[in-house]
Image (cartoon, helix red, strand yellow):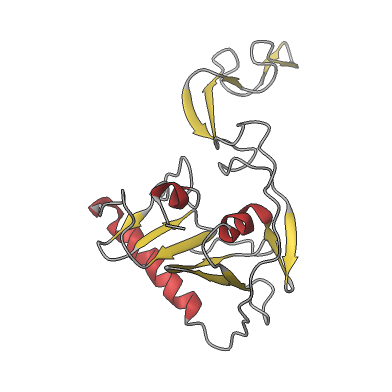
Amino acid sequence: MIITMETLNRFTEKGSTQLLDAPMSDGKITLATDAKILIEVDHVVDGVTPNENYNAIFDKVKNVMAAIFDKKNTVRKFKPLPFIEKPGECPACKTTGMIVSAKCDACDGNGEFDHDGHTYECQSCDGRGTHHGRGEAIRCETCNGMGYSRNEINVGRSLFDTRYLYLISELPNATFAPDLKDVNGAAVFTFTGGRGAIMPIQQVSKVFK
């Protein structure tokens, strides 16, 4: 299996305001992340070109990856992942990860309005505050842009989002190693041509801030 631009895009954050919406390269390696999972490919993937706008975030992601793999006093054992069933599609965005939506002008996006001291549901938008199907495409809040419904599974002592584990399982010859000492510590994975890291669900903070 060849790592493609399409593969890497699945590890990015759709609609990101932090330059995490596309794979990045320095002309030597390629990185992709949504701040909860990182993937590093040991070559420049076709279609990914160096972009100076991403220089700062590229260096940050690269340093975080190195720090996770070089973390001392960590016990890890690499094994193939157990079978991960493909997650069900998100009912809101139908796997696209994006929703075409516009703020409701009638209620100014609040989904309700006050009149004579009473609060009423906005009839124009049925209380949603937005109108789907028109306006600009935004990240789906139901699935956080991943396009699939969330489920959870324990690997070792840590709990992980099966949507991420499924992505990892699709990589060539993937092996996975949770932090056996810290249930909230980052797990790492390797595959032919690269490596990566993922945070367990219990970890409230993101991989990097």
User: Where residue 135 sits: x, y (%)?
Assistant: 48, 20
Q: Is the residue 89 above or below the residue 136 in the image?
A: below
State the residue in front, 42 or 154.
Answer: 42
Query: Which residue is depicted at the point 58% across and 89% down?
Result: 73
Q: How far across and how far down the image is residue 121, in percent?
A: 72, 16
Residue at 58% from the left image edge and 71% from the top image edge: 175
In the rendered view, does 197 fall on the left or right side of 85? left
Q: Is residue 143 left or right of residue 102?
A: right
**Residue situated furthest front in the rendering:** 1
Say which residue appears at 69% left-offset and 20% top-offset.
127
Q: Residue at x 59, y 36 (%)?
A: 95
Res. 209 visible in picture? no
How many marks are shown on the rendered structure?
A: 0
Q: Is 127 situated above or below 33?
A: above
Q: Residue 116 in the image: state x and y as whole percent.
A: 72, 10
The correct choice, above or below, for 130 with respect to 178 in the image is: above
Left or right: residue 71 compared with residue 81: left
Instruction: Answer left or right for 64 relative to 178.
Output: left
Residue 123: quarter of image: top right
Q: Nearer the viewer, residue 158 or 165?
A: 165
Foreground pick, 1 / 30: 1
Q: 91 or 176: which is nearer to us?
A: 176
Q: Position of residue 102 (x, y in %)?
A: 52, 21
On screen, 111 above or below 55? above
- Would you say residue 75 is visible in this rendering? yes
